[in-house]
Amino acid sequence: MKKESVGLVETQYFNMDGELNLESGEKLNDIKIAYETYGKLNKEKNNAILICHALSGDAHVAGWHKNDAKPGWWDIIIGPGRCLDTRKYFIISSNVLGGCKGSTGPSSIDPKTGKQYGLDFPIITIKDMVKAQKKLIENLKIKQLLAVIGGSMGGMQVLEWCNSYPKMVRKAIPIATAAHSSPQQIAFNEVGRRAIISDPNWKKGNYYNEEMPKDGLSLARMIAHITYLSYESMYEKFGRRLQDKEEYSFDFNLDFEVESYLHYQGESFVKRFDANSYLYISKAIDYFDLTSNGSLIDGLKNIKSKILVISVDSDWLYPPSQSEEIVMALTANGVEVSYAEIKSPYGHDAFLLEAGQLNYILGDFLTDTLVQDVMAYEVASIKENATLEEAAKLMMDCRITHIPVVSSENTLIGIVTAWDISKAVALKIDNLDQIMTRNVIISRIDESIEKAAEKMKKHNISSLPVVDYEQKIKGLITTDQISTLITRY
Ligand code: SAM
């Protein structure tokens, strides 16, 4: 087992109450969502990062299940010391609605019939997948995610999160993805679906407890796999080398290494994936379109999160032009957006492989946390003419230890703390004016949390009022809020 892995992990299950209204107008009951978490949720619940998976992924993103031959699918970036550092962040991942890795999907039992849903499973969309994830996040009592991250179809979920629930996402990283599926992407998906549907064992989706449509699903995976690689990486990996032979066979058996490799990919895929889930999930990808009346600027106008868009230079399935289109639309909407291109010969798959670049780019973006990302926005304050008793009562009622004192124009003029109240009692002072500190150390919303923490350490205080340039209070930042986000190991 690798040194920086999160170690042994287990999948957990969330049983959703009530029904989920789907985008198609249908409803789904008795939904179960499989999920995994790594790291600890802090007291303020502001260090949670959600990972969204691609078409054939699952909730097992990092660490090892008992008897695993390899770790979770994004283990290269998750764990102590990696960019998604589990000593700082609480990482959550879940299997999508419609999937076959523990979440409710077409291979689940339909409570109405007692049999697998098959094609009775309703059509689901990326919006529905995200809606189900939101229920899971709410169940974990998390009001806002520090970040949502995902590649390919995972990136579509990231964009959907930002669009549907703008207040719930502080930062977002869509990788190697698109804001709407292109005709080429839809075309490849349809060829994959036809391969499954044409398999005589598919039987209109009613193959459970019988022979699986292995040939069709395997073929679908072989086609898709080609699109995940690049011309260059295929040449590099296989050349025109023959598989276990010196000469051409001059028949239709496998000659080339690349053929053998693709067959191996197809055969191993059918052991871990359900053919009907492949149909439903690939259809959800095809339907994904965040444009509104043909305009992506209009479609993305609700987005509030700070976004880092990442593409891969050799990705021809989700080419950088699709990422650039997202960046342009977000920029036009005044969203704080940055863009990075991974340089890699690996094509679309690079988002799963380029550990060094991913750790560097994601780490840089995530550690760039500002005071506004973690401060409390609702702050109790008192007027300068308030009494000591009023200040003490407010502390008790709101369970706080620091209260900014404001003028009649609501500008900051002092701070009073539980420590000051104790001092007043000890010295028998009954005047707020005499005990409050007037020379207040403040912070600004765009200050880095490292800077704010340094100030607090230097002055031996645990809280800074956050003010604008007119000295009006915007929030309050405390050592508690940032302690788990700044770590010095
Ligand atoms: N660690 C405790 C705390 O943070 O309040 C006590 C340490 S310190 C000796 C207490 C004093 O610092 C109190 O008189 C309080 O008014 C003052 N103080 C607290 N926050 C302040 C701030 N942001 N700016 C200036 N003084 C502050």
Image (spheres, grey):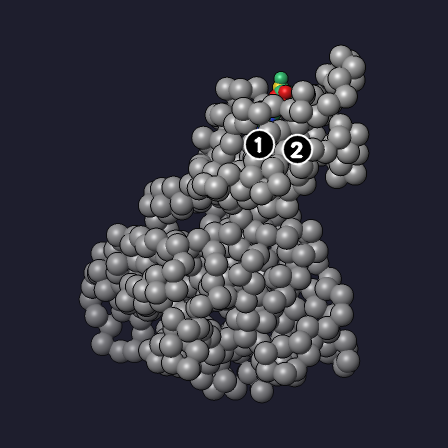
Residue 233: image location, x then y, percent: 25, 58
Residue, x 39% and y 64% (percent of image)? 333
Q: CA distance from mark 2 to mark 1?
A: 8 Å
User: Vertically, is 41 above or below 163?
Assistant: above
Q: Quadrant of residue 406?
A: top right
Inspect the image, locate mark 1, and give the three-letter code of the amino acid beneath it.
Ile
Query: Callout 2, which amino acid?
Result: Glu
Q: Secondary structure at mark 2?
A: loop
* Residue 191, image x, y percentages: 40, 81
Nearest the viewer among 306 and 186 is 306
Q: Is residue 174 above or below residue 125?
A: above
- Tell me if label 2 and label 1 are in contact, CB under 8 Å: yes
Q: Residues within 10 Å of mark 1 (few under 14, many from 20)?
A: some
Residue 413 disc label: 1
Residue 52 got which mark?
none
Residue at screen point 51% across, 44% down? 372
Q: Residue furthest top?
A: 427
The residue pinned by badge 2 equals 384
The answer to whether residue 258 of the structure is visible from this angle is no
In the image, taking residue 369 as reference, residue 207 lies left or right, namely right
- The quarter of the image that holds ligand 1 is top right
Which residue is at a point 67% across and 57% down the rendered structure image? 138
Q: Residue at x 36, y 45 (%)?
A: 361
* Residue 193 screen position, x and y as percent: 46, 80
How many residues crowd around disc 2 within 10 Å: few (fewer than 14), some, or many (20 or more)?
some
